[in-house]
Image (cartoon, rainbow, N blue to C red):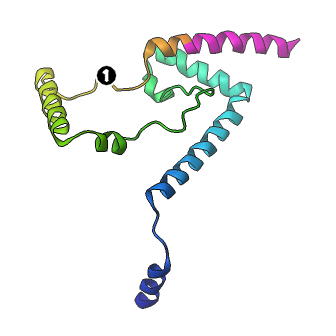
Amino acid sequence: PVRMYMREMGTVELLTREGEIDIAKRIEDGINQVQSSVAEYPEAITYLLEQYDKYEAEQLRLSDIISGFIDPNETEDMAPTATHIGSELGEDDLADEDEEDEEDEDEDGDSSDDDGDGGPDPEVAREKFGELRAQYEVTRLSIQK
């Protein structure tokens, strides 16, 4: 069994970086299609707005509801990954960044993420959810007529 497995592994081509990127794009497109389909269901919007109300009542974190906003009109294929960014920086730049990170942690006294969880901007979220709520009400009223 081991020899058969090793022989089979020798004939299978490994994934290249481009292959991984292609698979990741296909997965992301699939996720976006599912999210778009769910977003057309009115009860999903109701649930999302209820969750945002819980965030405003400080029962949830914003990052528990959303991870960010996507511009559907954006033409850029893909944002640079950490690998791309890291490969563009020289070793001196990377060392400088490491030192700055260590200094930031020392100044804070701890590295906990109480307020700075790196999630979406609350002001942008407030604006987007306000627009969503207004459009939802218009749509809901037109459906009831």
Whether residue 24 can be seen here: yes
> Which quadrant of the view contains residue 116?
top left
Q: Which residues are magenta?
A: 128-145
Q: Is residue 143 magenta?
A: yes
Q: Position of residue 142 (x, y in %)?
A: 83, 12
Please, what is the three-letter code of the amino acid marked with disc 1?
A: Gly
> Which quadrant of the view contains residue 91?
top left
Q: Quadrant of the N terminus?
A: bottom left
Nearer the observer, 30 or 73: 73
> Which quadrant of the view contains residue 144?
top right
Q: Is residue 26 magenta?
A: no
Q: Position of residue 93 (x, y in %)?
A: 19, 35
Nearer the observer, 15 or 110: 15
Q: Position of residue 59 (x, y in %)?
A: 44, 19
Would you call the spot at circle 1 few (<14 residues within 10 Å), some (14-19), or many (20 or more)?
few
User: What residue occupies the far right of the structure in this picture?
Assistant: 145
For label 1, the residue is: 116
| Predominant SS of the magenta segment | helix
Tally the marks: 1
64 with respect to 98 (left or right): right
51 with respect to 10 (left or right): right
31 with respect to 116 (left or right): right
Q: Quadrant of the C terminus?
A: top right
Q: Identify the residue at horizontal 50%, vertical 16% (top origin).
A: 125
Secondary element type, mark 1: loop
User: Where 91 falls versus 12 (above or below)?
Assistant: above
Q: Identify the residue at horizontal 73%, vertical 25% (top origin).
A: 42
Nearer the observer, 25 or 46: 25
Q: Position of residue 34 (x, y in %)?
A: 66, 40
Q: Identify the residue at horizontal 50%, vertical 27% (top origin).
A: 65
User: Where 33 falls versus 51 (above or below)?
Assistant: below
